[in-house]
Image (cartoon, rainbow, N blue to C red):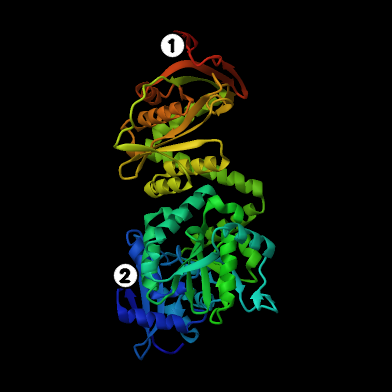
Amino acid sequence: MNEKLRLVLLREIPEDAELRQNWNALVARVDRPQVFYTYEWSLAVQRAYHSSLHPLLFLAYDEQESLCGVAALAVDPKGKVGSFLCANTGDYCDFLSLSEQKHGFVAEVFGELRKQGMQDITLTNLPADSNTLAAIRQTAGRSGYRCFARTAYECAQVSLEKVERRPEENKPVLPRKKMLRRFLNAMGRDAPVRLDHARSWEAINPILPAFMQAHVARFLVTGRISNLARPERRVFLEELAKLLSESGGVALTRLAAGEKIFAWNYGFQFQDTWFWYQPTFDSDLEKYSPGFCLLSKLIEEAADNPALKIIDLGLGAEEYKERFANQSRRTLCVKLSSSAAGHAREIVRYRAASLVRNWPSLEVGGRHIASRLLRLKEQASHEGLMATVARLARWSGEFLWSKDEVFFFEWRGSEKPESGATRLERLDAHQLASAAFQYCDDAQTLAYLLRAAARLRGGGVEGFGLMDGEGKFLHFAWVRAFDGFFLSELNAKVDAPSPDSVMLFDCWTPSCVRGHGYYALTVALMARRLQRDGKKPWIFSAARNLASLRGLEKSGFQRCYSLVRKRTLTWQRIQGETPKSAEVPAARASARA
């Protein structure tokens, strides 16, 4: 390109009405405009992630001083590694300019990045059909960068023009029509099933928290931590809704019947595309496939809107998307490195990962090893290197031979009223989601919540949480029938002293609230409640866990007997017997211990 560009580098996204207008006018003129390219999107990212992301905004002006190029990038604190500003939030990211100006704009940006000392650049979710890739390959080398591009995602799409329609009604033919009708009828027994679209901030604001909690709860049930557990992500969605609602571009859609909400989609209607961006549904209604029903209804509605041509189902290769998709759009991850060694390392890493994916058992083993190494690294950081080495030495010794004793305690405490400062609540998926919000920075508690969600899904147990007056969780614990309870410390199932005995287990206090006696208080409150229900509460503790033993002694539980596991390599023996009656004299228990 011969036209001279004037490049402006900014370290933040200015809150400027004129820039907003010119930026979005440019978006409307580029090939295949996306909501992720808009000024509002970048500004929402900056507002939400200002503490961790450092914007690097390039604006290009032509000879008439018209805005003709925008590249919203971010840089690490050292200024050495760059990326798209919206890489972690946008399904598509790109350099914005008209085709005839793209090469010149990309060359100017890379030249300036090199002057700034940028060593590595990762451009994620660049559309494969964008002419930006060709511009990068032609211009990056002149700035000293080596380029490697690989596939990032295949984004499923529904082209409404390709959707088959029923001639008599001109309605789209949807997959699993009979199943859809059956599910909609089941959900609509009391009131017709409908779609509600909240488009203004005034309409979105009061229902956004319920969507966020449902999303986190759904992810916990599926063994994952939702990005909405992070406060930054929630702020981002709030800010984005405020900004895009001014033009009607955002829609928080709900599948509902009467007052009951079955499923949600935080999405966008931009140009000729409806974006299926962040959906979720109530896991209690999973048997009715509410997410599938919501998408079906949304496609039906979109098919009647002549302004819409595409429903973009976004990142991720979920199976349900394939039922609806009739085309896809590929995105790339483009790596640029100023180092030949770094460039070669990236290629080798990618080839190795591709090879491993072809061998599922090897991939699982590799992930397991990587996970163990990560845990060891975290332990070394938290406990110190010497303590971690001592732990490993102890584990090695116990692999050869070990002796573990477990004490069993029966509730013998008195009936007391519950404290007004705290309360005991039964756990469900939504309560676990609230706990994930509260402890999003506590990796160990998040791992506990994932385990708790899986346990809830399996049934046969009850979970309880101790909460303070402000609704913060202080402790968690579970209860189930004693008989046949599997005790990992003994690697065996145990018998119950009596048919009405129940076992309290898997107690957990988040690290930031330890040392306040919440363990003892929680199990005592649970024991009193269970006793009122006609149950005999029991609990156990490893003999070496002195903190647990002290807590149980304070709570009102009394030690009654113990079992000992002796193990040599893969052989083990359990010593001791469960008493036939719950009324075991303390002296007899001590003898067994």
Residue bearing mark 2:
12
Whether residue 273 is situated above or below residue 295 in the rendered picture: below
Q: Nearer the viewer, residue 486 or 136?
A: 486
Q: SS for tag 1? A: helix
Residue lying at the far bottom of the rendered structure: 64
Left or right of 165, for residue 49: left
> Label 2 crowding class (10 Å Cα cut-off): few <14, some 14-19, many 20+?
some
Is residue 282 visible in this depiction of the protein? yes
Q: Whole-percent x and y of residue 322?
A: 64, 64
Left or right of 358, for residue 462: left
Instruction: Give the mark nearer the N terminus: 2 vs 1.
Output: 2
| Residue at 37% in and 55% down | 231
Instruction: Name the kind of residue labelled 1 in the image.
Output: Ala
Quarter residue 88 falls in: bottom left
Disc on res. 472: none
Q: Whole-percent x and y of residue 91?
A: 50, 67
Residue lying at the far front of the rendered structure: 190
**CA gap, disc 2 and disc 1:** 70 Å
Q: Nearer the viewer, residue 474 or 384?
A: 474
> Label 1 crowding class (10 Å Cα cut-off): few <14, some 14-19, many 20+?
few
Whether residue 323 is situated above or below residue 365 in the rendered picture: below
Whether residue 184 is situated above or below residue 284 in the rendered picture: below
Left or right of 161, for residue 558: left
| Total numbered circles | 2
Q: Whole-percent x and y of residue 422?
A: 32, 37
Disc on res. 586: 1
Q: Nearer the viewer, residue 14 or 410?
A: 410
Whether residue 19 is situated above or below residue 357 in the rendered picture: below
Q: SS for tag 2? A: loop
